[in-house]
Amino acid sequence: MSDVVAEPATDAGHVRRANVVGLGLIGGSIAVALRRRGWVVCGEDGVTGRAAEAVQRGVIDRDGLDADAEITFVATPVGALPGAVQAALDATRGLVSDVGSVKAPVANAVSDPRFVPGHPMAGSELIGLEGADPDMFSGAVWVLTPRADTPDTAFTAVASIVSDLGAEVVAVPADAHDALVAVVSHVPHLTAATLMGLADERAQDHAALLRLAAGGFRDMTRIASGHPAIWPDICAENRDAIVATLDQLIDGLTHVRELVGGGDRAGLTAVLERARQARSNLPSRSVRPEELAEVRVPIPDRPGAAAEVFTLAAELGVNIDSFEVVHSLEGTSGVAVLLVDAERSERFRGGLLARGFKPSVRRLV
Amino acid sequence: MSDVVAEPATDAGHVRRANVVGLGLIGGSIAVALRRRGWVVCGEDGVTGRAAEAVQRGVIDRDGLDADAEITFVATPVGALPGAVQAALDATRGLVSDVGSVKAPVANAVSDPRFVPGHPMAGSELIGLEGADPDMFSGAVWVLTPRADTPDTAFTAVASIVSDLGAEVVAVPADAHDALVAVVSHVPHLTAATLMGLADERAQDHAALLRLAAGGFRDMTRIASGHPAIWPDICAENRDAIVATLDQLIDGLTHVRELVGGGDRAGLTAVLERARQARSNLPSRSVRPEELAEVRVPIPDRPGAAAEVFTLAAELGVNIDSFEVVHSLEGTSGVAVLLVDAERSERFRGGLLARGFKPSVRRLV
């Protein structure tokens, strides 16, 4: 990941240029993060006057789209994405990515070699331009969901740009993304809201209830304090995965209810012990240099090969700390150089070999 | 609340003495918190050698119970409380309180004018003596569940001691306590574990799932990282309230599932908006002096009157920032002097008048 620079970012001698469509919390944060790194950022928003306000606040450089921008990030509400992404492809000659919380609908609706769908797993309780934060993506996971036919050049270019913003790139197929975020984001959000609503109802009977709400309850309901506006869209777009996950959660709670009702101490302990262990296995974001290994993977000359390396890493639970694609002197095919968790580097090597890649692994000391 | 003092605490010229039965995380924390305030603390534990270890670590002064201690805190596992509380009453001449997470079973099992059941809403992910922390109760709510026949002197003495440890006293009947903690503690804990188990199951299929778990998911499952040992007891003792609350949560999630499945955007927004508002109304622990009012309540000469003042405050959602009971020159009956949130002081006055008290309210500036 590159250091932040004050001068204009240049690529082959040119100032790098980007567009941001949709200047809310995430779009605004991308714009200021790019500008801090020297990019010139143009932008537009469906709300009249919002782009002008963004110029005034220093979030973007200019109102309107730059047809020659290297990349256009589309950060509209989820329901509007397919149309907005297609419009960005039509209006510009560069790459296009989006930031929607649901990926299959837009990934299936728009098949263009210049489009790489994405989803930064970041945010805050703030809304709109006021919350725009150039550090929002530092240390965050930024999911990319390349298609099988996404060109390597497009995928690695977008991965490189979001990686420069401080994010950790995780590549998964769009359908898998939607199933996973139903579990780790959408259903937890709905559950927090349901629990908070239940407590609120009981608080009508006894005002002391909320005074008894200690740290654990506050932690559990924190996400329920977010603004509801984006959720009807998300629930509509990811309906099937959310309903399926809610069904599983309801089954799980019904099982726990039976354990409690039946006084099954061993069963209850098993549920809690499994959860405790799983919780302690949540990946840590901080990796010390001595725990990294460098994996070099020559990228074969076929479409989607670079994306496949990233997707395989995600499938195998291998954290890519940083990466670059270097090109050999002989031709256009490149070598992906990835830094990964040392303890998972052998697993990664095995997976790459099984898929026909020829990796080399070197432990960093 | 008194400042921390280095010299021995004295009451009518004597060093103050306490016992702690059960030297785990909470018992150990009470012991070190009292010792820091100059108390001499004796202690015992069912595990051989634990009390000796506690002496060695400076958690208590002496192994064994002091029959003349002013108060004995019983901090055994919930299932063992009735026996341990009765044993403490038999072995000592002072007050007895406990710290169990479920209150009705022990409050109903032991009716002794020297016993005031309690529950500090504090803890940490640590276990045992190693986690003992003299600041654990600073700013925490400490629930007391006096019975109708709990003498005023016993109630106010225990309230005063836990208040000196930095806690905020909230008085509610034992049954109400158990119903409320099912909502704000027990069911949230079981839900966090269920959600974590569900994510763990899905992570078997796709290792990337846990990498996508951002701050919201981490917040929601944090309490699932606690040690499971205490939970089978809690679930057994508070079974009915937990089962009833799980049923309500399952109903709530089933309703949300129907809203998502049916594409009911307005219904979904209503659920989320209600939760957002309720979350923003969670009481804050920090009260500025200009927001306090002093309420003086002469305590009539009948048993349970002081406890009733506190219980009424909790019912009305009135936060008692601090209190003392001062005695009039004429006799033994006293005046409770309470500092409460100024904005709720009129509500409190109304409630007190309705119950036959004769309060006076003065806003502090």
Image (spheres, coloured by chain):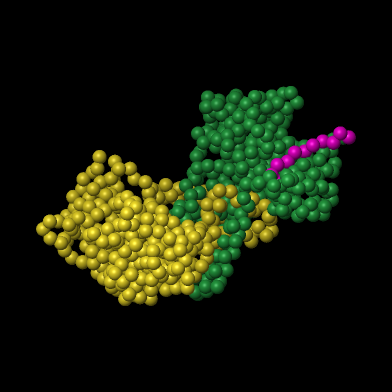
Chain colours: A yellow, B green
Q: Residue at x 62, y 47 (%)?
A: B285
Q: Is residue A179 visible?
A: no
Residue A104 at x, y percent in the picture: 36, 70
Q: Position of residue B141 (x, y in %)?
A: 63, 45
Residue B263 against residue B356 in the figure, above or below:
below
- Above or below, B354 against B3 in this view is below
- Residue A72 visible in the current orientation: yes
In front: B90, or B121?
B121
Query: As rendered, which of A9 and A215 lies closer to the eye?
Result: A9
The picture quadrant where one finds residue B162 is: top right
Q: Residue at x 34, y 45 (%)?
A: A287
Q: Position of residue A44 (x, y in %)?
A: 41, 70
Q: Position of residue B269 (x, y in %)?
A: 54, 69
Q: Is residue B329 magenta?
A: yes
Residue at the limit of the structure toward the right, as seen here: B330
Instruction: Report whether B316 appears left or right of A219.
Output: right
B31 lies above or below B144:
above
User: Which portion, as a residue range, is magenta?
Assistant: B320-330
Q: Residue at horizontal 55%, vertical 42%?
A: B123
Q: Quadrant of the N terminus of chain B?
A: top right
Between residue A344 and residue A244, name the one nearer to us. A344
| Res B5 quadrant in image | top right
Residue occupying the point 55% across, 26% down: B58
Left or right: residue A178 compared with residue B270: left
Q: Main secondary structure of the magenta part?
A: strand
